[in-house]
Image: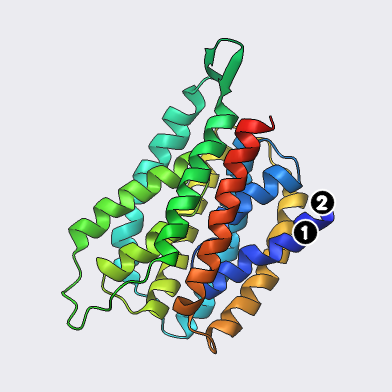
């Protein structure tokens, strides 16, 4: 299973390079099911892997002129506050066993995976649905962009997800960026969010296996390079529905596995 996990890690970077999101959606299941890492620790590992991979990606997109720094900061700054609140204040206080029904216990790890799978399916539906192009897009609504950023920070903080599957639609509809610029800008936001979340975990003393993280991040980086090169030739918007169906199947699999086969 570990060898399959290393191979699957390429897809993390490939997804980030092609469509600017989806990497964190894949990272948690890969860490939990293929590398047998506890979900709570996997959220910390995911922040590092996705964050460092996104950094390399946003550097490449900056060279291609696909980064909108102002939109990224308006989105990322509120995200940072919500990430720190969730990971440093709320998350550590959630009990390992949240409640029990008869002999069945609902654990913190179980809750993480169930919420994650629900978000996976919601993100998948968003990717699959076709959206009509706006002929005369309005100016960027920075207030709404900041509010969405705060909400995405909550998701990033609780699940260790970069939130690219939420960031891309926000940049398309509130910052009114073209798809390629939304992809590049989302990678910068993902890097900022993930870095802050991981730094917070280090501060509270989360145990980290750096050699493992560096290996997985290096493999994901290879996928990122491939994804960026492909993005120059392939329209990421055309790949989103295909990726969406893949994510939907994975989300259903996680729910079934967590409920029926625990």
Residue at the image position 16 percent from the left and 75 percent from the top: 138
Residue 35 is situated, as x and y percent measured from the top left of the image, at 76, 46
Label 2: state its secondary structure.
Answer: helix
Q: CA distance from mark 2 to mark 1?
A: 6 Å
Query: Looking at this rendering, what residue extends furthest in the bottom direction?
Result: 233
Q: Is residue 234 above or below residue 102?
A: below
In the image, residue 32 lies at what x, y percent?
68, 43
Q: How is the image coloured?
A: rainbow
- Write down the quadrant of residue 42 in the picture: top right
- Residue 141 horizontal side relative to residue 122, left or right: left
Q: Nearer the viewer, residue 259 or 77?
A: 259
**Is residue 25 depicted above or below 135 in this figure?**
above
Estimate how packed mark 2 is, as few (under 14), some (14 to 19) or many (20 or more) residues with alpha carbons within 10 Å.
few
Q: Position of residue 98 (x, y in %)?
A: 51, 19
Q: Residue at x 18, y 57 (%)?
A: 143
Q: Is residue 41 visible?
A: no
Q: Is residue 179 above or below residue 166?
A: below
Q: Which residue is mark 1?
A: 6
Q: Is residue 249 visible?
A: yes
Residue at 44% over, 65% down: 127
* Label 1 residue SS: helix
Q: Nearer the viewer, residue 51 or 3?
A: 3
Asked if the residue at tag 1 contacts the one at tag 2, i.e. Cβ–Cβ closer than 8 Å, the answer is yes
Residue visible at 57% across and 68% down in the picture: 15
Residues 114 and 180: in front is 114
Q: Is residue 122 left or right of residue 232?
A: left
- Give the number of marks: 2
Disc 2 marks which residue? 2
Image-quadrant location for residue 262: top right
x and y, in percent, of residue 178 in the image = 34, 79
């Amino acid at each position: 299973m570990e060898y399959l996990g290393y191979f699957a890690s390429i897809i993390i970077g490939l997804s980030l390079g092609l469509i600017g999101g989806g990497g964190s959606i894949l990272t948690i299941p890969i860490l939990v099911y293929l590398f047998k890492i506890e979900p709570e620790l996997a959220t910390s590992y995911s922040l590092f892997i996705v964050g460092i991979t996104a950094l390399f990606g946003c550097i490449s997109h900056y060279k291609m002129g696909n980064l909108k720094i102002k939109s990224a900061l308006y989105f990322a700054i509120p995200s940072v506050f919500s990430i720190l609140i969730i990971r440093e204040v709320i998350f550590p206080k959630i009990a390992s066993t949240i409640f029990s029904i008869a002999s069945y216990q609902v654990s913190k790890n179980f809750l993480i995976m169930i919420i994650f799978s629900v978000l996976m399916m919601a993100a998948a539906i968003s990717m699959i649905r076709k959206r009509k192009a706006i002929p005369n897009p309005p100016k960027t609504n920075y207030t709404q962009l900041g509010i969405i950023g705060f909400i995405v920070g909550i998701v990033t903080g609780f699940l260790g997800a970069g939130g690219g599957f939420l960031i891309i639609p926000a940049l398309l509809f509130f910052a009114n960026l073209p798809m390629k610029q939304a992809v590049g800008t989302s990678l910068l936001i993902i890097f900022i969010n993930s870095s802050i979340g991981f730094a917070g975990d280090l501060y509270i003393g989360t145990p980290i296996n750096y050699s493992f993280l560096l290996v997985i991040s290096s493999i994901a980086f290879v996928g990122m390079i491939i994804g960026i090169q492909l993005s120059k030739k392939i329209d990421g918007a055309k790949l989103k529905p295909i990726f969406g169906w893949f994510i939907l199947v994975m989300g259903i699999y996680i729910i079934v596995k967590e409920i029926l086969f625990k």
